[in-house]
Image: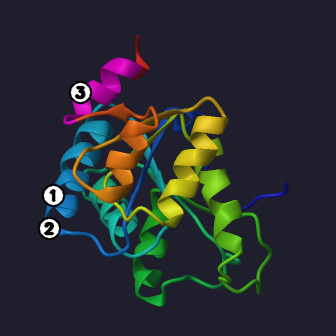
Amino acid sequence: MKLYIEGKILQSDCKAIAVVGSRNLSPRGEALTKKFVKKFVKEGYTIISGLARGIDTVAHKTALAMGGRTIAVLGSGLDIIYPFENKALSEEIVKHGALVSPYSNGTKPLPKNFLARNRIIVELSCAVLVVEGKRRSGTLSTASWAANSGIDVFAIPGSEATDWLIEEGANSVKSPKEVIDKLWI
C-alpha cells in the first residue's frame, strides 16, 4: 500500500508507541494520556495516533509540548484535515514528525477509511496503548489489528473498552513504566 507523507519519518521513529482511545475523553482519560505520553517521550518514543478528537489530540499535543516526535495517521487525504479544528495541530506535527495517509489528496474522511488508518497506526508502532473507550469503538479495531499482528496491546483498566481488552488478553497497565519494562524484556 502506498503511503503519502508530509513531514519526515526518521529512523528513530521505529521506536514508537501508538496511543489511542475515546473521542469523548473523560478528565481521567486526559490525565492518563498526558502522564503516559510524557514518560514515553522522555524515554525517546515517538507517539503515533490518528489526529481524532479526544485521546488522539491530547497524545499529539502532549508529545509536542514535551519536545517529542509524533506521527498522525489520517483517514483522508493529507489536504483534508479532519477534524478541521486540528488544522493548526497538524501543521505543528509536520514540523516535529509527520502526517501519514494511505489516501491521495482529495480523499474525504469517510467512515470506511478509518479502518485502514487504524491498521497503519499499528504498522508504524512497536506497541499500542488503549487509554479508554466504549465497548463498540474504532479503538478496538486498532487493538485488534495489533493483536493479530503480534504487536503488544496495553490497556489501562477502568473503561468498557479497556476492561474488555484486558479480559481478552491485553496487558493491564497502570503506569507508563509497566509498558516500557515489557517492551525491553
**Magenta highlight: main SS:** helix
What's the residue type where badge 3 is placed? Lys
Stretch in magenta = 174-182
Question: Please, which residue is most extreme toward the top here?
Answer: 185
Q: Is residue 178 magenta?
A: yes
Query: From mark 3 to mark 1, how far is it between C-alphas?
Result: 16 Å
What's the residue type where badge 1 is placed? Ala
Residue carrying label 2: 27
Query: From mark 3 to mark 2, how far is it between C-alphas?
Result: 22 Å
Judge by depth and name the residue closer to the eye, 1 or 178.
178
Instruction: Say if residue 87 shows up in the picture.
Output: yes
Q: Quadrant of residue 44?
A: top left
Q: Are marks 3 and 2 in contact (CB under 8 Å)?
A: no
Disc 1, SS: helix
Residue carrying label 3: 177
Measured as percent of width and height from the top left, residue 145 is found at 63, 46
Q: Residue at x 64, y 69 (%)?
A: 114
Q: Quadrant of residue 103?
A: bottom right
